[in-house]
Amino acid sequence: MPATIVVGAEWGDEGKGRAVDWLAADAEIVARYAGGDNAGHTVRVGGTTFKLHLIPSGILHPGVTCILGTGTVVNPLILLHEMDYLHERGIEVTPARLMIDARAHVITPAHLALDGASEAALGVEAIGTTKRGIGPAYASKMSRTGIRIHAMRDPEQFGDLLEKAVAEGSRALQALYNQPAIDAKALIGQYVDASRRLAPYIGDGVTFIQDALDAGKHVLCEGAQGTLLDIDHGMYPFVTSSHPTSGGALIGLGFGPREVDRVVGVAKAFSTRVGSGPFPTELDGPLGDRLRGTGENPWDEFGTTTGRPRRCGWLDAVVLRYATRLNGLTELILNKLDVLGGFETLKIAVAYDLDGKRTTALPYDLSALGRAVPVYEVLPGWTENISSVRNLEDLPEEARRYVARIQEIMGIPIIAIGVGPARDQVILP
Ligand code: IMP
């Protein structure tokens, strides 16, 4: 069985973790291909809610080997913390279950300090990053001054490299942001200790995945973030610094496009966004508040990584069509349909009015997106609570119509509909 890529079709937080959890049942390998602990995947299994940032959600399936691919950036302390978190919940993360590709890059204490300082310096124009050091870590990688994971195999050399990186980071902090040098002695000690514990997990993820594909195994490529956060194809500069789109999976794991037979997009039944930047279908006020929830429930719209309330709005089909073509989506998983219960009418943006013209193309220019006025199609809502529905036929007619309309607009089948946070709260049409 070849590779399946799972990508977020919107601004992230679409519920990719649980989508991967459903799809991982018949996968041998689940591999993260981009990003780092800026991601937040919430999966509820039985009565336990798992919140993962770095380790692929596939870890919740005993037979699966997880990989942090070449394209990821790894904070070793966060990784260890997550391994301990899983251990406390009865899941042992052994080297047979998790491999960190030796080519992935290390997020150093300097990257963390620089992320915070650059956001503070931007003031009201801040990107709204997760402050996990993601942008500076990818900047080091691209400027060829980063530290790759394989350096952790030699703790002494790793300590030296970290000291150099921190000294360089301190110079940048002082020169660019007038901030004091980073005091990272204790942190560097923790990183070096972490390298001793993590050394058995470091391996050649690229060859491992290629061998698995040659042997006919099913590799599930777990995307993080979402299409509109892609560094090239998202709403620059309000993006992350990697490629969450399907092309990123090939580069970030190291195999060719012929291996891929499915690209599964994940979307929510409405739109959300964390961080700054234009968001045409955003709902301020009571409707947005209703979509967001109160935060008492882990399913509510508050960031898994930062706890920030997410901005909420109507479904944006201009974005979904863009994501379909950009990623070559073959199918869609639609999450959180249950949250739309009780709205008298529901709206889907099918085009934008921009400077006197109607368009279905997503503007590449931020200021144009800021001026875009959504053109809505209005559909009737439903009042029933659908969280215990498991068959498409048992959904209220209005809910089926809403799903059918999304499918029609995107031109691909919807293969799963999430109606609640638990693993089994899903309709498989
Ligand atoms: P960074 O990835 O921390 O540099 O943040 C850059 C932008 O991506 C900010 O708008 C973040 O809110 C957003 N972002 C990063 N990771 C996620 C995610 O997993 N879900 C949603 N937004 C994210």
Image: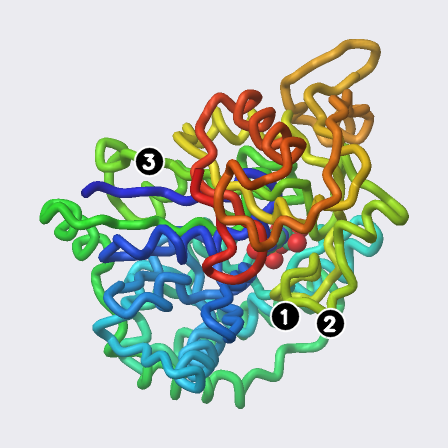
**Which quadrant: the C terminus?**
top left
Helix, strand or loop at label 3? It is strand
Q: Position of residue 269 (x, y in %)?
A: 63, 40
* Residue 25 in view of the camera: yes
Sequence order check, earlier mark of 3 and 2? 2
Q: Position of residue 355 (x, y in %)?
A: 82, 14
Callout 3 amino acid: Arg
158 lies left or right of 185 = left
Label 1, residues with CA under 10 Å away: few <14, some 14-19, many ≥20: many
Q: Which residue is mark 1?
A: 113
Residue at the outermost right position: 285
Residue at image location 84% in from the left, 45% down from the top? 287
Sequence order check, earlier mark of 1 and 2? 1
Q: Which residue is mark 3?
A: 262
Q: Position of residue 190 (x, y in %)?
A: 46, 87
Residue at image location 41% in from the left, 53% down from the top? 20
Q: Position of residue 238 (x, y in %)?
A: 67, 44
| As drawn, 305 above or below 192 | above
Please tell me whether mark 3 or mark 1 is closer to you in this view. Answer: 3
| As drawn, 18 above or below 285 | below
Cα distance in 3D space between marks 3 and 1: 39 Å
Residue at the outermost left position: 215
- Answer with the quarter of the image where residue 133 lies: bottom right
Tell me, yes or no, whether the two marked residues, 1 and 2, touch with CB atoms within 8 Å. yes
Q: Which residue is mark 2?
A: 179
Q: Is mark 1 within 8 Å of ligand 1?
A: no
Sequence order check, earlier mark of 3 and 1? 1
Residue at the outermost top position: 357
Residue at image location 32% in from the left, 41% down from the top? 250
